[in-house]
Image (cartoon, grey):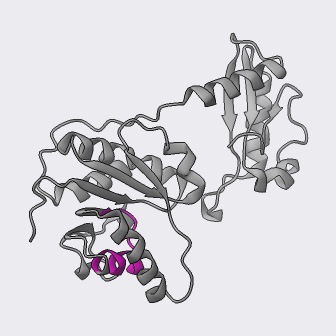
Amino acid sequence: MTHPGDPTRILVIRTDRLGETVLMLPALHLLRRAFPRCRLMFMVHPELQELFADHPELDEVLPEPACSGAWWSRAWQLSLRWRSQDADLIVIANPRKEYHLAAWLAGIPIRVGYDRKWGWLLTHRVADRKALGGCHEITYNISLLASLKLPLQEAPVLTLPISQQAEEYVSQLMNRLGVGSDKRLVSVHPWTSNPKKQWPLERFRMLLDRLGRTPGVRPVLIGGPQERARAGEVLPGVSPRLMNLIGQLS
């Protein structure tokens, strides 16, 4: 098994949903502490690149490239991209056969990930027990780094800085809507990409209405452009104090 030594360029892969990607931040923080002089690169789903672009502990946030064809063809295309990153350590947090093959084809010497979906192509593997739900996602992510035998005594830290540009945009938006700084805003996103995790929309309507009737609170309905057509599923019967910002935030 190859020892990580002191890598100069680290590439971390997390290209699935928003929640899982945000919960990768504590592991990234520990990587930064373990290798303070390295160039730390984070590859995410293209729609999430903006969210992490200004994070002070990341040197580069990369969108997952669009690759076409069969899985082995996508792996070859991806390996060419990864080879250009010249990483000497890669951490693959969401296992996919094409990722593991791409990392091997790219010649990245230290390859960390879960022991499934052609995990034998990795140099450092951990058993994937996430389906058992025995630990928090943050703990599972950090367990990947433990396979490198790093000193991980520090408690997990999750920070997601907000850029000044984003602060100014939201401040201007609140001013246009006549919302004072004395109001507490509660944002609600009623939909999920996984139908099995969908809370009944009728309960979201009740929640939004109750928030709208709570003194000092303004409920905010949020969602992407794809949810604009679905706003009517939760708006009928809701307090008129609700702010509908679906499609107005990145």
Q: Identify whether 171 is placed above or below 80.
A: above
Residue at 13 percent of width and 50 percent of height: 150
Range drawn in magenta: 91-104
Q: Is residue 100 visible?
A: yes
Residue at 69 percent of width and 12 percent of height: 181
Q: Quadrant of residue 163?
A: top right
Question: x%, y% of residue 25?
Answer: 38, 44
Q: Identify whether 1 is placed above or below 164.
A: below
Residue 130 located left or right of residue 69 = left
Residue 155 located left or right of residue 67 = left
100 or 244, nearer to the observer: 100
Q: Identify whether 5 is placed above or below 26.
A: below
Residue 237 magenta:
no
Residue at 77 percent of width and 26 percent of height: 173
Question: x%, y% of residue 145?
Answer: 22, 55
Outermost residue to the top: 182
User: The N terminus is located in which quarter?
Assistant: bottom left
User: The C terminus is located in which quarter?
Assistant: top right
Question: x%, y% of residue 119?
Answer: 28, 78
Q: How many marks?
A: 0
Residue at 53 percent of width and 58 percent of height: 17
Outermost residue to the front: 84
Q: Is residue 92 visible?
A: no
Question: x%, y% of residue 141?
Answer: 32, 54
Residue 100 magenta:
yes
Residue 47 located left or right of residue 70 = right
58 or 152, nearer to the observer: 58
Residue 116 located left or right of residue 228 = left
